[in-house]
C-alpha cells in the first residue's frame, strides 16, 4: 500500500500545484502573463504587470494550493497506511512526514512546470515555487515559515529584490528544518525538506546571475502591457 499511497500523493499534489493561479488571474484581466515581464505566473510578475490586488490574490492562491496538497497527503496517510509508519531501507519512518515531503515536492514541481499551461499554450510555464512551498511547509511546521519570513521580508524591504529575499528566506527555512529535526520537533524524514530548499534556490539560478550582474529588477518596477 505504500507505493499506492505515494503514487496517489505525488499525482494529486502535482495536479493541485499545477493550477496556474497567476495565469488565470491574468486571463481574467485579458492579459497573457507569459508574454510580459519574466513570463512567469508568480505573484511578482503579476504585480509588475497587473497590480497589487491581482498579485495579492495570486500569492494567496499559490500559498493555499501548497497547503491543500500537503493537507490531502496527511489526510490520506491513515487511510492507506493504517499503522502510520513504514519501513524504508530498514528504517521505520512516519508515513505522514514522508507523504508531506513528497506532496510538497510535487506541488512545487507542478507550480514550476504546469501541465495545464503545457496543454493550453503548448509549452511549460509557471512560477518559481516559493509561495506553494511556504503553503506546504505551513501545514508541517509554522516555525519554518516564520523563519523564512523573518529573514525574507526585511531583505525584500531593504534591498527591493524579491529574488534575493526568496533565496535568503529559503536558506533560513532550511536551517530551521535542521534545527527542528535535531531537537526532536520534526521527524528525521523532515530533513528532505532541505532538498526542497536546494531545489527552490536552483529554480532561481537566472535571478542569481542577474543579481551578480546587477541587472535584476527591483520590487516596484513595472512592465509595459
Image (spheres, rainbow, N blue to C red):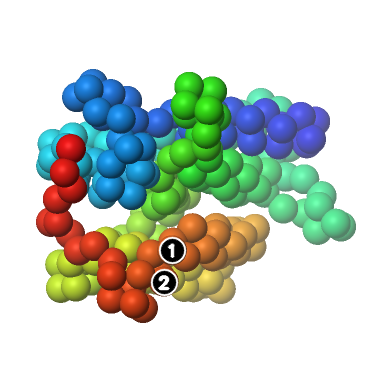
Q: Which mark is residue 206?
A: 1
Q: Is residue 117 left or right of residue 64?
A: right
Placement of 18 over or under 217, stated as above or below: above
State which quarter of the image contains the C terminus.
top left
Residue located beneath label 2 in the image:
209
State which quarter of the image contains the N terminus.
top right
Q: In the structure shown, which secondary structural element does the residue marked by tag 1 occupy?
A: helix
Q: Residue at horizontal 13%, vertical 40%?
A: 51
On the question of residue 208 being in view, the answer is: yes
- Measured Cα–Cα span from mark 1 to mark 2: 5 Å
Placement of 176 over or under 20, stated as above or below: below
On the question of residue 78 being in view, the answer is: no
Q: Residue at horizontal 19%, vertical 73%?
A: 159
Q: Which mark is residue 62?
A: none
Placement of 133 over or under 154, stated as above or below: above
Q: Position of residue 163 (x, y in %)?
A: 32, 63
Amino acid at each position: 500500500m505504500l507505493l499506492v499511497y505515494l503514487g496517489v500523493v505525488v499525482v494529486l499534489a502535482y495536479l493541485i500545484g499545477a493550477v496556474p493561479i497567476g495565469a488565470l488571474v491574468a486571463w481574467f484581466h485579458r492579459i497573457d502573463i507569459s508574454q510580459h515581464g519574466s513570463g512567469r505566473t508568480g505573484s511578482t510578475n503579476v504585480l509588475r504587470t497587473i497590480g497589487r490586488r491581482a498579485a495579492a490574490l495570486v500569492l494567496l492562491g499559490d500559498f493555499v494550493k501548497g497547503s491543500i496538497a500537503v493537507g490531502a497527503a496527511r489526510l490520506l496517510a491513515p487511510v492507506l497506511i493504517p499503522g502510520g509508519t513504514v519501513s524504508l531501507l530498514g528504517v521505520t519512518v512516519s508515513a505522514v512526514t514522508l507523504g508531506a515531503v513528497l506532496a510538497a515536492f510535487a506541488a512545487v514541481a507542478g507550480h514550476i512546470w504546469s501541465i495545464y499551461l503545457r496543454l493550453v499554450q503548448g509549452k511549460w510555464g509557471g512560477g518559481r515555487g516559493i509561495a506553494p512551498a511556504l503553503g506546504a511547509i505551513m501545514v508541517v511546521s509554522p516555525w519554518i515559515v516564520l523563519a523564512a519570513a523573518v529573514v525574507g521580508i526585511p531583505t525584500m524591504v531593504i534591498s527591493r529584490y524579491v529574488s534575493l529575499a526568496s533565496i535568503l528566506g529559503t536558506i533560513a527555512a532550511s536551517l530551521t528544518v535542521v534545527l527542528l529535526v535535531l531537537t526532536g520537533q520534526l521527524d528525521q524524514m523532515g530533513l528532505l525538506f532541505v532538498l526542497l530548499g536546494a531545489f527552490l534556490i536552483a529554480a532561481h539560478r537566472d535571478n542569481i546571475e542577474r543579481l551578480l550582474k546587477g541587472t535584476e529588477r527591483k520590487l516596484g518596477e513595472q512592465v509595459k502591457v
